Image: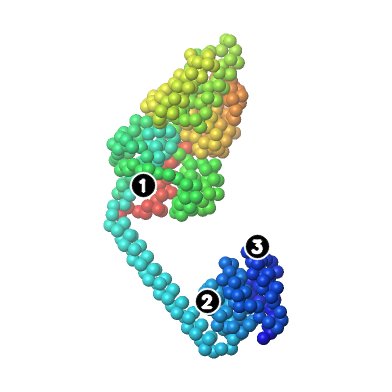
Amino acid sequence: MTFSFDIAKSPIAIYCFLHCTEISFPPLFMLLSLWSPIHKPPRHVFEQIEKHELLEMRRVASYIYKKAGRWKQSIVLSKKDNVYKDAMETASESGDRELADKLLVYFIEQVLIWTLISTVCALILKLVSVAIIGGRRKRERAVGFFHPYTNDGGGGERVLWCAVKAVQEDRPDLHCAVFTGDHDASPESLMARALERFGVKLLYPPKCKVIYYMFFGWMYGFVGSCAHLAMVNSSWTQSHIEKLWGIPDLIKRIYPPCDTSGLQVLPLERPVRSPTIISVAQFRPEKAHTLQLEAFSIAVRQLDADMPRPKLQFVGSCRNEADEERLQNLKRLATELKVEEDVEFYKNVMYSDLMRLLGGAVAGIHSMIDEHFGISVVEYMAAGAIPIAHNSAGPKMDIVLEEDGQQTGFLAQNVEEYADAILKIFKMPETERVKMAAAARRRAGRFSEQRFYEDFKAAVRPILGNSS
């Protein structure tokens, strides 16, 4: 029996003869070395090829069977590997009607079986989804808020309570549940804390559930891409979420709530006897309090002898022992820099005390790199304190921008730039300082609590639906 290969019309697997790999070379070498135009290769070569681990090699064996007229062996091998196209071509070329009919019946059976299985699975899923939806409709509807720390005293906590309040005002028929990692949290304590620390009065205590959590980057991106709505707190955050989640049309930029109305009633004039710089931030490493203290010490040394001695006030909260230790290290550094008499520390202050401190500051300092927004910077501006913020992310892109062509503050990146900005404010004539502070206050009006409530409600209303 004679047969030969037509490379152009053979399956793509036949190109293994031309592009061998370490795995395919030994059996191919044996096949080629034993091949002749008038003889078939020995049977053991066929068996070795058809049992090879590479699908391409098994397709070669099926093709050889077909060219040798061994139609059934070729079809059986193609069916085993689910290469139905090869099996159909072989049956067609064989001219054997019975063989072709059997193959057709086999395909119909396979299609019917999988169709039946798919239909049953779809029906089960439909019944389960109907049961879940029906069960959810019978339950009381709720809005869940996840926040890992509800007692950290930072800007993120203010956003949480203002968001809860917005939902309570707009949809009083819905329950609000706060999911947190704070083990000692309770509905009553959370409601009291929102009022004491931020002046946010909730309509009723939120439900509280303590959870343990772990985030993975891939899960973050996957879950985010499934959202019906994504709210971001700044232009910088928006650019990152658009890249990570890939849902630009579903993203709403809603600036965090800042108590600009309460702070804007403070007078812009400040006592010149002892100009004060305030720093409002949790005592966390990323807040870079050390940089602020070093910049302040440099500026103090460069002041003229006849100028009043300035003060630096650190106002923040401690979440744990690590934060407490960081605070103590900051106090020791002030002593080493010989400015301990000029630096004051305030821990876990009430909101009323924070307003009083902001009302006496000529400037507010912020030094966190890539802060998503920077609520403290807006609070400085609303209170009439000129901001000195890090030249990145939220403060750079959204907050410390010109208002009506007037400068509203300073941006800095290193100790020297911060020290230079501090000196400029200390040496600035009072009329010029008040003019800049007024522009900063107008700029801060863009980020009010009222604006947050309006934008937040407008964003979630299509998701929550109308109250019934």
Image coords of residue 457 (percent x, y):
40, 46
Q: Report crowding for label 1: few under 14, some 14 to 19, many 20 or more residues within 10 A (C-alpha).
A: some
Give the residue type that dot 2 points to: Lys
Q: Which of the two residues, 426 or 140, is positioned nearer the viewer here? A: 140
- Residues at discs 3 and 2 in contact (Cβ within 8 Å): no
- In this figure, which residue is indicated by the disc labeled 1? 144
Mark 3 / mark 1, whichever is N-terminal: 3
Question: Which residue is pictured at 52% across the width and 24% down the height?
Answer: 290
- In this figure, which residue is indicated by the disc labeled 2? 79
- In this figure, which residue is indicated by the disc labeled 3? 22
Inter-mark Cα distance, 3 to 2: 27 Å
In the structure shown, which secondary structural element does the residue marked by tag 1 occupy?
Answer: strand
Image coords of residue 417 (percent x, y):
61, 26
Q: Is residue 327 visible?
A: yes
Image coords of residue 338 (percent x, y):
53, 14
Question: Which residue is pictured at 61% across the width and 24% down the height?
Answer: 416
| Residue 409 placement, left or right of 18 | left
